[in-house]
Amino acid sequence: MIIRSNCFRTGHYSSLHIIPDFLVPAFASARPVRPFSSSSGCRSRIGEAPVSIPAEVELQILSVRTKRNAGIAVTELPKTVEIKGPLGTMSVQLPPYMTLTLNKETKKASLSIRDREERKQREMWGTTRAYLHNHILGVSEGHSVILRLVGVGYRATIEPSASTKRPEYPGQQFVSLKVGYSHPIEHGIPLGMKASVPQPTRILLEGPNKEVVKQFAAELRKWRVPEPYKGKGIFVNGETIKLKAKKIK
């Protein structure tokens, strides 16, 4: 038991420890931390939301084989969902603790997890649902990105060959950018994706895989990131930038 030095207490003091007053606050219990927001936490519940399946899209759960070692089951391999549509075929891997339920009457698919109290399962629940939704939309309608080239002399063309890069597959086309360098910037179009130039300062990217389309757009954008003084650069979709005042010496 700890008491202050200026406290008065009668009785036997063998079990008491006397400490100075300036050390007493150090032994005080920590106060509860007050959160910045007074509103209660609310989860997004994205994983619970069902995914609509268009009429021209088919979902199929491929059979899973359990990994065995000397006749004893060791681990449960992730399941694979194959998505077929008019624009191609894609697949999504489901973790072993996740289950996909298909409702043929309402044409909707829903995901469920084994344990909602486990954080890792809740995190992958919404992530897997987003991947499934993007792939279904990709094989049915496709994903698109528009790049705007803003700057004097900036222009883009689609070329059947490149002088600085070799084709990765037969018939590959290349996007050639003229954005202020002494040489043109050439990028090969990924397999399964389409690129067109409706205007010299516009690039239209289309493809079923949203991740591939966005990544290719980011690779083109990095050559001329929009700058805030003259507003020049490569803008993705409706991207805008706030202009700054010019530096005056």
Image (tube, helix red, strand yellow):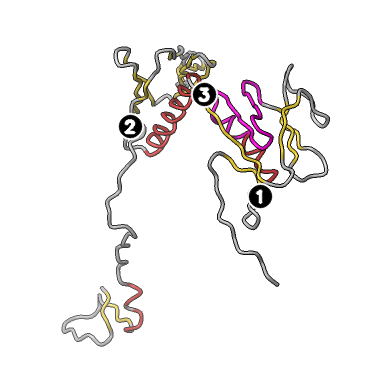
The residue beneath circle 3 is: 142
Q: Which one is in front, 105 or 163?
A: 163
Is residue 171 part of the magenta span, yes or no?
A: no
Q: What label does residue 66 carry, if any?
A: none
Which amino acid is tagged 3? Gly
Q: Is residue 151 above or below residue 81?
A: below
The quadrant of the rendering that contains the C terminus is bottom right
Q: Is residue 60 in view from this perspective? A: no
Residue that appears at 65% across and 55% down:
230
Q: Can residue 157 be seen here?
A: yes
Q: Residues within 10 Å of mark 2 (few under 14, many from 20)?
A: few
Q: Residue furthest left?
A: 10
Q: Quadrant of the N terminus?
A: bottom left
Q: Secondary structure at mark 1?
A: loop
Picture mark count: 3
User: Which residue does the numbered mark 1 point to in the structure image?
Assistant: 232
Q: Looking at numbered disc 2 in the image, what kind of residue is underneath it?
A: Asp
| Helix, strand or loop at mark 2 | loop
How far apart marks 1 and 2 lie (CA) works out to: 50 Å
Mark 3–mark 2 Cα distance, whole angstroms, equals 34 Å
Residue 128 position, x and y percent, is 44, 29
**In the rendering, at what x and y percent does residue 119 appear?**
38, 39
> Which image quadrant for residue 196?
top right
* Camera-side mark, 3 or 2: 3
Residue segment shown in magenta: 190-216
| Earlier-in-chain disc, 3 versus 2 | 2
Magenta stretch: includes residue 213: yes
Q: Is residue 91 left or right of residue 21?
A: right
